[in-house]
Image: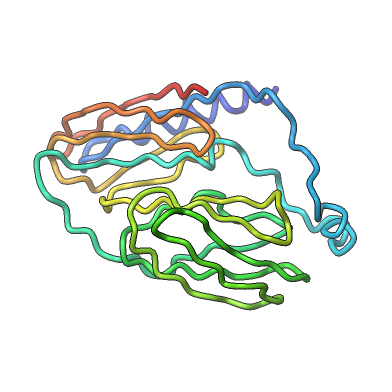
Amino acid sequence: MKKIVVLLTLILILPAFSTAGESKIYGRIILPVPVKKESAFPGMAYRNRLTSPGISGKKRAAAEDVIVLAYPLSFRPVVKPMMNARLLQKESCFVPRVLPVTPGTTVFFINRDRYYHDVFSLTPGARFDIGRRPTGTAVGKTIKQSGELKLFCDIHPGMTATILCVETPYFTRSSRNGVYLLKNLPPGRYRLEVYHPDLKRVAETVDVKKNKALRVDFNLKR
């Protein structure tokens, strides 16, 4: 039944993305079938002791960790720092697990749990540690280096996240059902790239026409 609902959702959504009137790229991301279950980690019991029954929201879909990026090849885009970039620490998880930003963006780390968290990175050239912070604390960090910035919490080893700093203003997150939409794209040639922290990157070169919609589907692999 679940597969039927997802299929019907895609049938209804994808044609709507293809309507004319602006230049855009849309499509579906197909992910490999999961092969292992989430494992327990130190700090899990601590989290469970402090989390009230029913507080957990719906489980994050793997497709929500997919970021689709369009890098212009026929023109140089204007890339500015983003506003209001936030990475939450909630129920012993980073939310979102992948945060795309542009260089110069200040990301605010906000603790929404009832216990302490830390945020640190050992990424070469971008190391930092904001220290252990209590509930409600927001700490800002300006991201200057392009590429992947891996994040951890020294209290909860199972907590990981990635800040993906990119040199393009054209990117979007996939929906829970694996559907994505890049809109308001200037006409031109692009390298379309799909990122997931646990899967191989895939890319394709495409031409975006004025006031036309282009469908591009991707099949990600391990």
- Figure check: 66 above or below 92: above
**How many badges with numbers are in the image?**
0
- Figure check: 28 above or below 196: above
Name the colouring of the figure.
rainbow
Residue at horizontal 16 percent and vertical 39 percent from the top:
211
Q: Answer left or right for 121 relative to 50.
A: left
Q: In the image as oriented, which residue stretches furthest toward the left? A: 74
Q: Answer left or right for 83 relative to 37.
A: left
Q: Nearer the viewer, residue 51 or 22?
A: 51
Residue at horizontal 68 percent and vertical 60 percent from the top:
154
- Figure check: 206 above or below 133: above
Q: Nearer the viewer, residue 106 or 181?
A: 106
Q: Nearer the viewer, residue 49 or 156?
A: 156
Q: Quadrant of residue 94?
A: bottom right
Q: Quadrant of residue 5?
A: top right
Across and down, in percent, residue 92 comes to: 72, 57
- Quarter of the picture holding the N terminus: top right
Across and down, in percent, residue 19 comes to: 28, 35
Across and down, in percent, residue 38 comes to: 74, 37
Q: In the image as oriented, which residue stretches furthest toward the front? A: 124
Across and down, in percent, residue 141 comes to: 45, 71
Residue at horizontal 65 percent and vertical 25 percent from the top:
34
Q: Nearer the viewer, residue 154 or 99?
A: 154
Q: Answer left or right for 15 relative to 3.
A: left
Residue at horizontal 72 percent and vertical 52 percent from the top:
57
